[in-house]
Image (tube, rainbow, N blue to C red):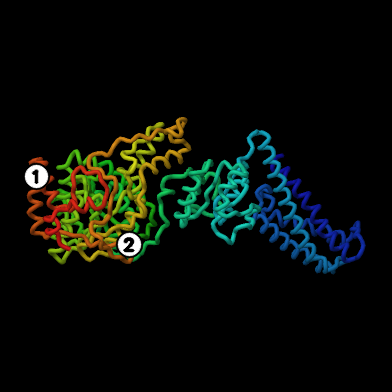
Amino acid sequence: MPRYHKRAVLIVVDFILLSIALWVPLSLRFGVPYVPPTGGVAFVLVLAAPLTTIATLWRFKVYRVVTRFVGYRGTTQIALAVGLSTLIWALFVFMSGQNGMPRSVIIPYGIFGAVLLIGTRYAIKAILNSADITTAREFSHVPPKPTLIYGAGRMGIELLKTVRRARDRDIVAFIDSSPTLWRQYAGGIKVYPPSRLAGLIESESVCEVLVALSGSQKQERREVLKQLEQLPVSVKVLPAYEDFTSGHVGVNSLRDVDVNDLLGRDPVMPRPELLARNTRGKSVLVTGAGGSIGAELVRQVMRQSPRLVVLLEISEPALYRIELEMSEALAKLPADVVKPRLVPVLGSAGDDQLVNALLTEHRVETIYHAAAYKHVPMVECNPTAGITNNVLGTLVIAKAAVRCGVERFVLISTDKAVRPTNIMGASKRLSELVLQAEAAKQIGTVFTAVRFGNVLDSSGSVVPRFRKQIGAGGPVTVTHPDVVRYFMSISEAAELVVQAGAMATGGEVFVLQMGEPVRILDLARLMVRLSNREVRDESNPDGDIDIVFTGLRPGEKLFEELLIGARTEVTEHPRIYKSDEPFLSWNELKHELDVLKLATEAHDMAALRSVLMRTVEGYRPGSDSGPGEDALKTRSDEQVLRTIH
């Protein structure tokens, strides 16, 4: 029907309902069925009641509310309109001298009228929705999928409402870990404990599970997803509830499970004073600003309202991307907000003249040194480039920091620096030694290093490579069935780096708590399963994706470590530890660095490796064994004697 025709029908229905709402209290008042008069003032008063209410409903725009979607707002509008119209009609009654209209029917009329109008609309809504469901099912010829919702909290209830509107899923049960909800009903659906999950999937023929857990429940979400990974159901998750407002939790918000859901950890609230201590109102330099970690460091620093941020990057496309992103973010800030100045600089952190000019011109107070070559096989094939950038570049910018009076210098290090088997790891450990030696010989600039493992979705992570291989139909390549790695999200790593740097007093090596190491083979299998495909192997020859072992690449280890020594201390932050690491005195290190520089200039690989063997504890070129007694035994007596705790 046309819109105005439907409104006319609704007005007629309301007139009839309001007449009944007046007739009932009048009949009760007189004790007999009330017969309206055919004329006079009493007839006008009887007719005025429903007409006044309908006019008020029109003024309150109640007839513009779509009955199918009537909700809290529509109910409130009706109640207010009926209440106001009742007061207006009561004024008419008193001004007319009542004329047979008892005062005792005024309030009951308003109550009955509101109840009838609201109740009728909800009844119409239920009938229309039921008809829509029936019609949709008749035309689709596809029965709704039996579905479970894991999480009976606010997210789960909102999701249930929108799933019911979508009508393509039949919610058969809630699962929730809270004992207070077990055997209760949420939205008419019974809530079961997690122990019933597998049984319900089998008994109810469930083919899909929707996970509705908040952003603060990452640990529980990870455990749930690992449990569901073993069951014959497809899984979809809602993003953190904080990402959208109430009422917008919908089927369109559901997404496939991502590897971040299984490797992520419950968030730990950052300490605002640590984030702001060396960034707010200060001039900050980020080297390698276009890389995965460097770019995230820039984002974290910009949130703390620095005075100026210098973006130093050797790659033009990478520098362009992060500068454009930050410029757009600044443009969105209110006009009355003091915006930090952004200075993009195309160049190398190893360029002594450039670095000195930048530190002097911009009066840099804090440096986050993220510039490095970090791809293990690539650096192994190009050792002189890796050493020049990672070690000699760090030496250049560290010396410049001391000369220019920089307050704080934070080096981004890696777990591969611990008893390394590759040039990249050895170069990063030597970079740490440079800072430790600088910190030991002067009391001006505070030097520190922050060490952590792999970050998810960085340019060197296996995650994007596996994702690309799965998308291409396989095979997925894994170096070794026993290789394990630590993983952390990029945002968490950068946030912890800023906080760790703020706690430094000079010469420390901070270690980020990475959680449990992840077996790469298990990660590959999991990503295949999350893409709704099956691994093809001997036990499942009809699977979709092969996993192929390619062997460890040059310089790779089966295991990574985060500590050289066993002595660590807790800090102000529960996920940041301070490690008591050995170091070399500056006099000894300076000689080795001079030899290293000559070796890189001459491309003398033997001399280069010899320097690394003498300076970096536990460096074993080409080894592929994991940590343990063998790793400890490889440290020569000379190395142990030459390091200082």
The residue shown at (63%, 53%) is 190
- Pick the residue in front: 456 or 62: 456
Count of number-bearing discs:
2
Q: Indicate the amino acid at tag 1.
A: Ala
Q: Would you place residue 26 above or below residue 228 in this image?
A: below
Q: Secondary structure at mark 1?
A: helix
Residue 485 percent coordinates (x, y): 32, 48
Q: Indicate the amino acid at tag 2.
A: Leu
Alpha carbon distance from label 2 to label 1: 42 Å
Quick one: which residue is furthest to the top in this view?
542
Dividing the image into 4 quarters, which one contains the C terminus?
bottom left
Dividing the image into 4 quarters, which one contains the N terminus?
top right
Quick one: which residue is furthest to the right in this view?
32
Residue 13 percent coordinates (x, y): 78, 50
- Pick the residue in front: 10 or 195: 195
Q: Would you place residue 139 above or below residue 487 in this image?
A: above
Side of 47 relative to 374 (left or right): right
Sequence order check: which comes first, mark 2 or mark 1? 2
- Identify residue for label 1: 607
Q: Secondary structure at mark 2?
A: helix
- Identify residue for label 2: 275
Residue 349 percent coordinates (x, y): 18, 49
Side of 143 relative to 484 (left or right): right
Frontmost of labels 2 and 1 is 1
Q: Mark 1, residues whose alpha carbon is within 10 Å: few (<14), some, or many (≥20)? A: some
Q: Mark 2, residues whose alpha carbon is within 10 Å: few (<14), some, or many (≥20)? A: many
The residue shown at (32%, 44%) is 483
- Pick the residue in front: 447 or 191: 191
